[in-house]
């Protein structure tokens, strides 16, 4: 089989390399780690999970849940590893970042068909089968080469949330519980509206009374930002909107967003006015991520403003949130439907650089890019069903679009059902059933080999 180069040892690149090796190819995996790091990376291991440790919901009523199920059916190496290193997160899949990345690295390095080379890649041989998965923080020299090759220059801004020492949380102003009790055991008692209090134990919920919430919103609006002007032209990815920018949209925006109290009741059975959720970062606990608190505030401002949350008044911040500029290509103009560059058909682009947004989306894109490159080298057709979430998202990348932006998995990408269903929940259930059945059949026919 062919020798294939994969540039980038992130989520997408590692997935592509492992799938290609499983298909019988020899792979040369190139990454600048461990000698050079981007502004957002700090772990010498591969497949570093940067912004949040959540891979989003497992619920098949969500597009993210369906996508993960599709990847499990396709035997995705990294989704399997994410499942193995999951931490409690209610109905979501969240991972222990360090253990997950370490294991991915071990699996890659011990694979006899994958040669890892630590190097800074400045350009790509257009005549060599390649998967470019250098990520949204692609090194400047390689980005310049890609811009010259495609004639493009595109980017958006992304942000990450702070991480807190769990022992520094004042539990006098917090309680443990999962929204709607999705993680398991029920806690006795009734909520203030008479519905059963089903709190369980994956999240720490920091409560806010109305005046405390008002003080937090005011603090966020007035706080000093780190990057002051460059990102203010509407180039922020909506899925990682900084918490202070959300606060500017209106007093109740946060209370109906990341600080919503719906489905949670404190130990007295009362639903708080608002609350901040902390999610475990590690299996052992101790480190907690501030859910939905991606931010562009200066570090000192983060400490000052977030300490307005009563439970975090003495919090120890182990890592502050940061904002960074992400690059991506205009996929509809630059890519063929099989993810190869129009100007270099043996060079495939995968992951966030291709225009998908999200951990699972990036893993899926690396997986499908590997299958598509393998198919091209074997001279066979490869068509991913559009009724699947993976197929609809890959299709989005090559579909004509005058205002192309990075995209998460979502139901809006899926084609409508043959029979119209008015009930939203039933419609999603039917779309999920269709997607799973189609991907299982497609895989069973040998089209998703590997």
Image (spheres, rainbow, N blue to C red):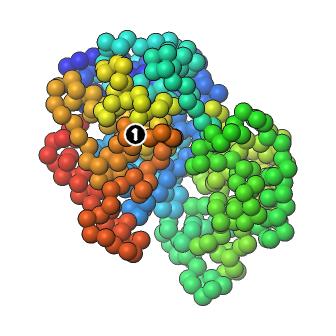
* Residue name at image x 78 percent, y 36 percent: 228
Q: Is residue 234 left or right of residue 7?
A: right
Q: Residue furthest left?
A: 445
* Residue name at image x 63 percent, y 82 percent: 191
Q: Residue furthest front?
A: 402
- Which of the image's four quarters has the C terminus? top left
Q: Residue furthest bottom?
A: 194
Q: Is residue 182 left or right of residue 369?
A: right
Looking at the picture, tell me which residue is in the foreground, 403 or 91.
Answer: 403
Say if residue 261 shows up in the picture: yes
* Image position of 151 with respect to 302: above or below: above
Q: Position of residue 57 (x, y in %)?
A: 47, 57
* Image position of 325 with respect to 396: above or below: above
Image-quadrant location for residue 429: bottom left
Looking at the picture, tell me which residue is in the foreground, 261 or 144.
Answer: 144
Q: Position of residue 245 (x, y in %)?
A: 72, 50
For label 1, the crowd category at 10 Å Cα-Cα, with few meaning under 14, some 14 to 19 and many 20 or more, is: few
Looking at the picture, tell me which residue is in the foreground, 409 or 190.
Answer: 409
* Residue name at image x 36 percent, y 19 percent: 343
* Residue name at image x 52 percent, y 34 percent: 48
Q: Position of residue 27 (x, y in %)?
A: 32, 20
Task: Kindly identify which residue carries mark 1.
Answer: 400
Q: Is residue 307 left or right of residue 260?
A: right
């Amino acid at each position: 089989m062919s020798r294939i180069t994969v540039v980038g040892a992130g989520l997408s690149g590692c997935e592509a390399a492992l799938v290609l090796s499983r298909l019988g190819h020899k792979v040369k995996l190139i990454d600048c780690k461990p000698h050079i790091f981007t502004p957002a990376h700090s772990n010498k291991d591969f497949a570093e999970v940067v912004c949040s440790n959540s891979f989003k919901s497992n619920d098949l009523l969500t597009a993210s849940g369906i996508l993960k199920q599709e990847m499990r059916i396709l035997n995705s190496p990294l989704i399997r590893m994410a499942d193995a290193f999951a931490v409690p997160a209610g109905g979501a899949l969240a991972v222990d970042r360090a253990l997950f990345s370490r294991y991915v690295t071990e699996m890659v390095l011990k694979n006899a068909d994958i040669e890892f080379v630590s190097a800074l890649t400045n350009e790509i041989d257009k005549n060599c089968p390649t998967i470019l998965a250098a990520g949204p923080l692609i090194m400047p020299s390689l980005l310049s080469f890609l811009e010259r090759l495609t004639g493009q220059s595109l980017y958006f801004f992304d942000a990450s949330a702070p991480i807190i020492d769990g022992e520094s949380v004042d539990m006098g102003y917090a309680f443990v519980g999962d929204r709607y009790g999705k993680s398991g055991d029920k806690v006795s008692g009734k909520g203030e509206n008479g519905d059963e209090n089903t709190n369980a134990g994956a999240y720490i919920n920091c409560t806010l009374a109305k005046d405390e919430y008002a003080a937090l919103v005011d603090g966020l609006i007035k706080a000093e930002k780190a990057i002051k002007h460059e990102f203010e032209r509407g180039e922020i990815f909506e899925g990682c909107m900084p918490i202070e920018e959300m606060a500017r949209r209106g007093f109740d925006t946060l209370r109906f967003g990341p600080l919503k109290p719906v489905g949670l009741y404190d130990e007295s059975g009362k639903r708080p006015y608002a609350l901040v959720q902390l999610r475990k970062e590690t299996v052992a606990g101790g480190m907690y991520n501030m859910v939905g608190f991606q931010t562009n505030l200066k570090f000192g401002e983060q400490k000052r403003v977030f300490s307005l949350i009563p439970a975090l008044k003495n919090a120890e911040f182990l890592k502050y949130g940061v904002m960074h500029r992400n690059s991506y290509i205009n996929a509809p103009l630059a890519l063929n439907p099989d993810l190869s560059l129009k100007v270099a058909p043996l060079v495939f682009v995968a992951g966030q650089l291709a225009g998908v947004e999200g951990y699972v989306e990036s893993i899926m894109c690396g997986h499908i890019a590997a299958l598509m490159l393998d198919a091209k080298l074997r001279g066979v057709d490869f068509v991913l069903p559009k009724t699947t979430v993976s197929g609809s998202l890959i299709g989005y990348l090559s579909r004509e679009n005058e205002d192309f932006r990075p995209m998460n998995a979502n139901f809006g990408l899926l084609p409508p059902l043959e029979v119209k269903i008015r009930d939203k929940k039933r419609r999603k259930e039917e779309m999920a059933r269709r997607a799973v059945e189609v991907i299982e059949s497609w895989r069973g026919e040998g089209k998703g080999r590997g």
